[in-house]
Amino acid sequence: MMLLTMKILVGLIALLFLSMGGNLLLNPGEAAASFALTPVGEAGLNTLRSDFAGLFLASCLFLILGLVQGRGVWLQVVAILMLLIAAGRLLGFVVDGAPVPANIQAFVAEIVIAAILLVTDRIMIARSTAATVS
């Protein structure tokens, strides 16, 4: 039951990333506002479509691969990305001054997502080890 609950959470995270990536890909100008960004000309729009959308869509793909294949290594990849993003945000808190509430919320979300992915990975490993031993 615990594994099923965690897989559902991972699936919801994948849907969130699909939505965010799709929005950045198809509507980068408006999507940028949710990241407190303003694209500068066509180059800025292109960066949002490529780098930002690519990050979210690749993360979605990795999560789906992890769920379908039952291989937690794909979840680990996305957890590492989330933790690196959170580390960059932490550096920003120190260098740029007091964080605004939106940045704190994003930081917490990144840490929670990474934790969900890593816990799910551990549960998947425990289940596969138990199945192999049996």
Image (cartoon, helix red, strand yellow):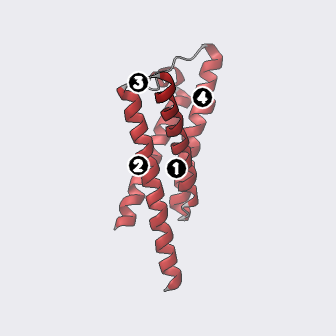
Tag 2 near tag 4, CB within 8 Å: no
Q: Earlier in the sequence, mark 2 or mark 1?
A: 2
Residue that numbered label 3 is attached to: 98
Counting other residues with Cα less than 10 Å from the Cα at mark 4, is it few (<14), some (14-19), or many (20 or more)? Answer: many
Q: Horizontal and vertical percent for residue 13?
A: 44, 47
Give the spatial CA distance, label 3 vs label 4. Answer: 30 Å
Residue that numbered label 1 is attached to: 79
Nearest to the observer: residue 67 or residue 118: 118
Q: Earlier in the sequence, mark 2 or mark 3?
A: 2
Residue that numbered label 4 is attached to: 49
Give the spatial CA distance, label 2 vs label 4. Answer: 22 Å
Tag 1 near tag 4, CB within 8 Å: no
Q: Horizontal and vertical percent for residue 31?
A: 48, 25
Give the spatial CA distance, label 1 vs label 3. Answer: 26 Å
Q: Nearer the viewer, mark 2 or mark 3?
A: 3
Nearest to the observer: residue 61 or residue 113: 113
Give amino acid for label 1.
Ala
Q: 8 left or right of 69?
A: left
Residue 12 bears which disc, if any?
A: 2
Give the spatial CA distance, label 2 vs label 3. Answer: 31 Å
Secondary structure found at label 3: loop
Q: Nearer the viewer, mark 2 or mark 1?
A: 1
Displayed quadrant of residue 105: top left
Residue drawn at (48%, 41%), measured in percent from left and top?
17
Counting other residues with Cα less than 10 Å from the Cα at mark 1, is it few (<14), some (14-19), or many (20 or more)? Answer: many
Q: Horizontal and vertical percent for residue 4?
A: 38, 64
